[in-house]
Image (cartoon, grey):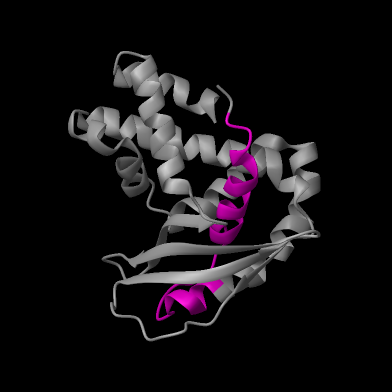
Amino acid sequence: MKFAYLKTFLTFYLLIICSKVSLESLSAHEYAERTHNNIIEIIQTKNQLFLDNPDLFTKEISDAFSPIVDFKRIAKNVMGKYGKKATSVQMSAFSEAFESSLLDTYASTLVEFKDEKINVLPPTEPSKSKTKARVNIEIVTSSNVYPGRYSMYLDEDGNWKIINIEINGMNLGKIFRNQFYSLMEKNNEDIDVVIEKWVASV
């Protein structure tokens, strides 16, 4: 089943995190603000490349996207209870399939979003943790303003990583997990089959 309604929210999610910025000594909010300064340029300069060379476009997106996202951690959260039954090979395979599905969705929908803005809202209170942060944002389109929030953590190398996002009350992590659970139920809990079908289901 195609989850077409996810495309808009996947695009917002990926727009937020696709940037080649130095993360050293930046707070979560500073990282987000610096990232957003590059979003406009990415959108405006890469559309033609998508039309001329989709594979190269996806490669550039991947190069910018991969270093700042913990795909293994997200994939593990998406697999949920089924992750306990998965082998290390299956976990790795799903992580790669998950990454591929996000990148392909982003590459095919990026050109549709030229005028959106993502504003980082200032923190309302000091963070209670030095290694975790929740950053509130607002996504401004031509017709609506959507409230959002994303979860970040500081990895062992001192880099902030985004691991989940909520947009207008929708939790993408839960949506992905529900999708994975649905595929597992429809395929007799065969993880290998679900991994093969994952990319086609997004």
Q: Is residue 14 magenta?
A: yes
Quadrant where the C terminus is found in the figure: top right
Q: Which image quadrant for residue 55?
A: top right
Return the x and y of residue 145 as percentages of the image width and height. 69, 64
Return the x and y of residue 141 as percentages of the image width and height. 75, 60
In this rendering, the answer to whether 118 lies above or below 183 is below
Q: Residue furthest top?
A: 188
In this rendering, the answer to whether 5 lies above or below 144 is above
Residue at 59%, 25% in the rendered image: 2
Q: Which image quadrant for residue 24?
A: bottom left
Return the x and y of residue 89 as percentages of the image width and height. 25, 29
Left or right of 37 on screen, residue 193: left
Magenta highlight range: 3-32
In this rendering, the answer to whether 135 lies above or below 182 is below
Figure label count: 0
Q: Which image quadrant for residue 137?
A: bottom right
Residue at 62%, 38% in the rendered image: 5
Quadrant where the N terminus is found in the figure: top right
Left or right of 69 on screen, residue 14: right
